[in-house]
Image (spheres, rainbow, N blue to C red):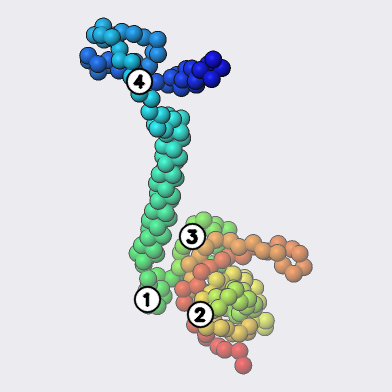
Amino acid sequence: MFIVSNVNLSLSSGEKNMTKHCPMCGNTTVDENARFCAKCGGELSQISVPQTQTAEPTGNKLKEAGKWIAICCGGAIFCVIIAAFVYGMVGSTSSISKAPILSIEEIKSQSQNIPYNSLMRNPDNYKNAIVKFRGKVVQIQQIYGDKYMLRISTKQQEYLGYFDDTIYVNYNGNRLVEGDIVDVWGNFVGLKSYTAVLGNEITIPEFNALNVEIVKAKT
């Protein structure tokens, strides 16, 4: 009796997931106590088939789908960022290529002789104007390669030569020497402020050089 009880108990626990089939209409039911088909009323078959449990849980499917959606969205955003960056680079290159390149003759013909004090007093009135100055190079600082910062005194005095009215010039070209007398044609940027060696702040006109010619080289 003890052995039979174990067998019955095993069968009872094994039938919890059994499915019964109706031999009349083929309807299935998971109610282990049902004797008659709920669809046609026929007596259910005593032969039971284990319910298939191979389907993946819905929660796991949703997690997997969510993961792939996140990956796809991230990839799409990354592609948009790269595309925007490339477009920006192309746009920048295009704008640079469209910028007018003036010949030396055009630079000279478009230049103006604007008084130094006018630039200091009303800088906004002359932004981007091409201005021509003659003066003495009093300081050269190499930025890198053939790019330099020049300070040029443009006021000529009878006994001191070029001494005052200094301008700040961003220059790209052959190296100059302090003491060279030069003609400078450049776009007026605005006023440049910097701290001198003694700690005082100095403000002078700033130019981007378009053309620089040596009038008298220092010997």
Q: Residues within 10 Å of mark 3 (few under 14, many from 20)?
A: some
Q: Residue furthest right?
A: 198
Between disc 1 and disc 4, whose residue precedes? 4
Secondary structure under tag 2 reads loop
Is 143 drawn above or below residue 50 in the view shown?
below
Q: Position of residue 139 (x, y in %)?
A: 64, 77
Q: Position of residue 25 (x, y in %)?
A: 22, 15
Q: Position of residue 87 (x, y in %)?
A: 38, 56
Q: CA distance from mark 1 to mark 2?
A: 16 Å
- Do the CB atoms of the residues marked 4 and 3 lie less than 8 Å apart? no
Q: CA distance from mark 4 to mark 3?
A: 94 Å
Amino acid type at circle 1 is Ser
Q: CA distance from mark 3 to mark 1?
A: 20 Å
Closest to the camera, between mark 3 and mark 1, is: 1
- Do the CB atoms of the residues marked 1 and 2 lie less than 8 Å apart? no
Amino acid type at circle 4 is Ser
Using the image as rendered, state which of residue 76 and residue 159 is in the foreground.
76
Is 40 drawn above or below residue 187 in the view shown?
above
Q: In the shown orientation, is residue 80 left or right of residue 140?
A: left
Q: Where, quadrant-wise, is the N terminus in this rendering?
A: top right
Q: Which mark is residue 103?
A: 1
Image-quadrant location for residue 18:
top left
Residue position marked by numbered label 3 in the rendering: 127
Image-quadrant location for residue 197:
bottom right
Using the image as rendered, state which of residue 174 and residue 44 is in the foreground.
44
Q: Residues within 10 Å of mark 2 (few under 14, many from 20)?
A: few
Residue position marked by numbered label 2 in the rendering: 173
Secondary structure under tag 3 reads loop
Between disc 3 and disc 2, whose residue precedes? 3
Q: Residue at x 35, y 20 (%)?
A: 48
Q: Residues within 10 Å of mark 1 (few under 14, many from 20)?
A: few
Q: Residue at x 67, y 83 (%)?
A: 159
